Image (spheres, rainbow, N blue to C red):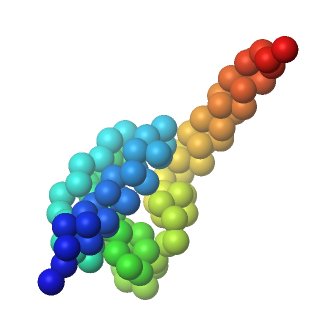
């Protein structure tokens, strides 16, 4: 029998991964959770919505003609389905680097 911690792991990990990528997606909503798998409806920057799941195999897009396409990271998955994701990722990185550069060093 799955413990509450096991039940929540896939859900929490998928939610955390998508929140970290908020710059590169429009929105997301967790739509299902089981002890071994969580799924979310993700609205891409281009407008379409995709169903993304996380299981012990990794991240997947559903339905996908290439059912074997499993990604180790959410970044890899988003790069494969969203052309605008890479541009948003670069922009977020540049903004972060500029904010670090602008921060005065302690004396």
Relative image position of residue 54 (x, y in whole percent) = 35, 69
**Closer to us: 7 or 66:** 7
Seen as rendered, the residue at the extreme front is: 107
Task: Residue 61 in the image: state x and y as whole percent.
Answer: 36, 68
Q: Is residue 55 visible?
A: yes
* Quadrant of the rendering where the N terminus is positioned: bottom left
Toward which corner of the image does residue 94 lie, by quadrant?
Answer: top right
For residue 2, side relative to residue 60 (left or right): left
- Measured as percent of width and height from the top left, residue 12 is found at 32, 57
Q: Which residue is rendered at x = 31% and y = 65% of the image?
A: 9
Q: Position of residue 75 (x, y in %)?
A: 53, 57
Instruction: Report the label total.
Output: 0
Q: Residue at x 79, y 17 (%)?
A: 106
Relative height, residue 69 to residue 82 (above, below):
below
Is 21 located above or below residue 6 in the figure?
above
Q: Quadrant of residue 35?
A: bottom left
Report if residue 64 is visible in the image: no
Query: Quick one: quadrant of the C terminus?
Result: top right
Q: Left or right: 106 with respect to 76?
A: right
Pick the residue in front: 35 or 54. 35
């Amino acid at each position: 029998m799955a413990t509450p911690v096991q039940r929540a792991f896939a859900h929490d990990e998928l939610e955390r991964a998508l929140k970290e990528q908020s710059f590169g997606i429009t929105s997301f909503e967790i739509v299902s959770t089981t002890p071994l798998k969580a799924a979310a409806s993700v609205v891409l920057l281009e407008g379409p919505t995709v169903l993304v799941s996380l299981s012990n195999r990794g991240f997947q897009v559903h339905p996908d003609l290439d059912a074997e396409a499993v990604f180790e990271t959410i970044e890899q998955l988003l790069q494969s389905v969203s052309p605008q994701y890479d541009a948003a990722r670069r922009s977020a990185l540049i903004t972060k680097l500029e904010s670090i550069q602008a921060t005065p060093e302690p004396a």
